[in-house]
């Protein structure tokens, strides 16, 4: 999908399909113009000139870095545990997410922790009552706890970026985003919005293996891609990639300890 014409097969999709592309920042205005008849700005965009907001994600992993290595080896069935918030002021809720990938299909569950109630003890010493919005969100939280405890997962790195988001006007679910200004910060703390300290750029030519600093274009749908998405990938000659922000952050940070990477693939490493 995304680069091939969609089939006529009708399926009911509760899962999500994602496709990512590394593009030159100079392409963004032309792509914005192309999608204007088909898309409208995401109303979470904050009301500025562009529908843009800041995403901060705390990525967890096991002591053996099992989630990282599952991506490195492109395991057909894998999952990640992450904790996410939006903006800088701490007024947004915190979202505990389990993101599974099963043969190219993304299945994501989420539990919303109301503003001001987040703390690492919700994971390390559960028992404090949280007013989840639905019973399903409470079950998602309990499943997150179970997986974190069984795997021994703990904080590894914070990833932050600016996201510009659009939704298909006439599609059941079609979403297009541009991610820019990517940066990361190693951490062993549960704080999502630490004050001070350094954030390291991760949208460099080195990170992407490109001769330029790229931006990330991402397409998401429930089922087959709408025709405007297919036409867009053909019009701009977009080449799909298997990019992972968490994987890239860990890989970049490992270079400071002497790791080296081949040019063959982002998943091919040597020392």
Image (cartoon, rainbow, N blue to C red):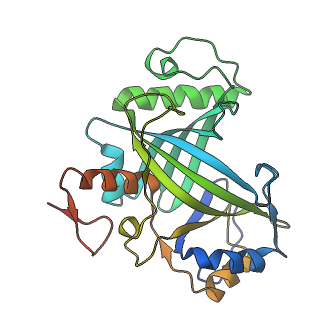
Work out which residue is located at the far front of the displayed protein and give it. Answer: 196
Q: Quadrant of residue 94?
A: top right
At 73% from the left edge and 74% from the top edge, which residue is drawn? 32
| Quarter of the rendering occupied by the N terminus | bottom right
- In this rendering, would 248 be left or right of 8? left
The image quarter in which residue 224 lies: bottom right
* Of 2 and 202, the residue lying toward us: 202
In the rendered view, would you say 50 is above or below 8? above
- At x 39%, y 25%, the residue is 149
Is residue 8 in view from this perspective? Answer: no
Q: Residue at x 70, y 81 (%)?
A: 30
| Viewer-nearest residue: 94 or 46 | 46
Residue 74 locus on image (x, y percent): 36, 61
Q: Residue at x 65, y 74 (%)?
A: 28
Residue 155 position in % (x across, y down): 40, 34
Q: Residue furthest left?
A: 271
Residue situated in front as seen by the camera: 189 or 100:
189
Q: In the image, residue 259 lies at what x, y percent?
A: 20, 57
The answer to whether residue 73 shows anywhere in this view is yes
Residue 7 appears at what percent x and percent y?
66, 79
Q: Is residue 140 above or below residue 174?
A: above
Left or right of 192 on screen, residue 68: left
């Amino acid at each position: 999908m995304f680069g091939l014409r969609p089939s006529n097969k009708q399926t009911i999709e509760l899962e999500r399909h994602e496709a990512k592309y590394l593009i030159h920042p100079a392409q963004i205005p032309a792509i914005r113009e192309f999608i204007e008849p088909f898309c409208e700005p995401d109303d979470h965009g904050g009301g500025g000139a562009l529908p843009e907001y800041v995403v901060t994600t705390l990525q967890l992993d096991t002591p053996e870095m099992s989630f990282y290595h599952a991506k490195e080896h492109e395991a057909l069935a894998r999952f990640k545990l992450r904790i996410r918030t939006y903006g800088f002021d701490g007024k947004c809720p915190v979202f505990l997410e389990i993101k599974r990938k099963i043969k190219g299909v993304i299945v994501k569950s989420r539990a919303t922790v109301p503003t001001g109630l987040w703390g690492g003890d919700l994971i390390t010493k559960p028992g404090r009552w949280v007013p989840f919005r639905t019973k399903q969100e409470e079950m998602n939280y309990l499943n997150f706890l179970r997986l974190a405890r069984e795997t021994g997962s703990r904080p590894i790195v914070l990833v932050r970026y600016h996201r510009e988001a659009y939704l298909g006007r006439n599609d059941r679910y079609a979403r297009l985003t541009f991610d820019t200004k990517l940066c990361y910060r190693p951490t062993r703390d549960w704080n999502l919005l630490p004050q001070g300290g350094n954030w390291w750029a991760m949208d460099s030519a080195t990170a992407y293996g490109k001769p330029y600093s790229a931006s990330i274009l991402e397409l998401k749908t429930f089922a087959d891609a709408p025709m405007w998405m297919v036409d867009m990938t053909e019009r701009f000659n977009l080449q799909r990639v298997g990019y992972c922000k968490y994987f890239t952050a860990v890989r970049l940070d490992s270079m400071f300890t002497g790791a080296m990477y081949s040019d063959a693939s982002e998943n091919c490493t040597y020392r």
